[in-house]
Image (cartoon, rainbow, N blue to C red):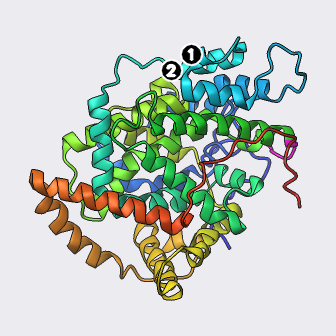
Amino acid sequence: MVAYEPQQREDSVGPSDGTTPPSPYPRRFRQTESLNRRLGRPLRLLLRRQGEVDPALLATIGERLTKRDETGAVLARALRITDRADPERVTMRQFRTALADGIDAVTQPPQALREFFAAVDPVPDWVDFDLVDEGGRVARRFGRNAADVMLQLALIGSYRFDGPSRLLVETGGLTGGSALRRIAETQQWATAVTGQGAMRRSGPGFRLTVHVRLMHALVNQQAELSGRWDTGRWGLPVNRSDLAATLGLFNAVQLLGVRLLGVRVTRAESRALMHLWKYVGHLMGVDEDWLCDSERLQHRLNYHLLLTQSYGGPAGPALANALVEAQSALHFARFARLRSAWARARLLSMLRYFLGRRGVRDLGLPAALPWAVPPLLAANLWRYHVLGRTAAGRARLLRSGDRFIRRNLRRYFGAHPPAVGALRIGPPADTSR
């Protein structure tokens, strides 16, 4: 059950203050802005020197709710061509070859494939791979703290807002038995980009990121072709505003979240992690003017994105509870039942800390006290404020973080991690069954 329901009618347009945006804006745009302002007060405090809300930026967000990644969309359409004689037809074998060995390895590559790799292969002048690798080390030193923030604050926390969460329910992406697999795939990708050299052209982070970009384009196409997605209300299923909001969860929200857990983050570490995700965002197709070099700029964009969201809806509780209950399916070598119960109780406790009483209630989750946080804060004070101030200590944190990443992926995947998000071409899935 969702405790908050928007006061506007289903067919209303625009923000709750009575103003009406231009007709191209989806109806969810700024639908619960007054509530979102209250939820965003802590973030607003970080931006007290950056002036008032920018109406032009809000308008751009509204416009991009109906804009897609056109480069990915063109390739997705070409992959659906069934006529083998059509010169514009692209096969998955051609895509995989180009991804692994470069576009020159494909014999007479179709135009859509050439244009897609022309968008991702050139390295922008601003990319500093030494800084990208340092950003990866920063993320890995966060260890379990990063995993906690991404699952609890970024992922489950985002389920309080309608739109993207509704798409996950429509496609069955994070409900039922698929919940554990999907969160594991997200974690696998998010950690793959942090490895040494992982974002070079031949690195696993680069390949998985490009893979995910095409997967988004295919999901967008499938949802649109199904005829069940209300673009007038929600915007495009995978749109450029929601894509930018997702990127913000991996960089600035991650940094803010680990600080809330007692982790010390220096300016240099913040800059490195932001640079890593700026390049990831570029490969994902995020608009260049929304790729941020600093936390402060990203927080400003995130705050404006927050104001435009629609709070509530039925999708969030279903998704949040699916992930909580999925803890019982984690793979533990010993004492599996006891450790799964502990993982579930700890998750609920951490959610209470990050989302507050209202957030937990609105997602229909069981009430819990944040008992798991004080011992974590105490441990992090030692690890990051004492140990992390020395080179030897940082090296130790890195080794510990790498061990946690391997252990955590085993708990979600089991002994044999599958590939991230298999790419499937076919008719629109029947999600009504």
Residue 137, horizontal then vertical, whole percent: 28, 46
Magenta stretch prevailing secondary structure:
loop
Is residue 106 toward the left or the right of residue 188 in the image? right
Question: Is the residue under label 2 in contact with that under label 1 (CB below 8 Å)?
Answer: yes
Towards the viewer: 15 or 417: 417
From the viewer's side, name the closer residue of 279 and 89. 89
Q: Could you give the CA–CA distance between mark 1 and mark 2, rounded to whole angstroms? A: 6 Å
Residue at left offset 45%, top offset 74%: 352
Residue 56 in the image: above or below residue 35: above
Residue 395 in view (yes/no)? yes
Q: Which residue is mark 1?
A: 118
Q: Which residue position holds label 2?
A: 121
Residue 63 drawn at (x, y percent): 63, 29
User: Is 262 placed above or below 33 here?
Assistant: below
- In percent of the image, x 38 and y 43: which residue is there? 299
- Number of numbered discs: 2
Q: Which residues are magenta?
A: 226-230
Q: Position of residue 147 (x, y in %)?
A: 41, 60
Horizontal and vertical percent for residue 244? 52, 37
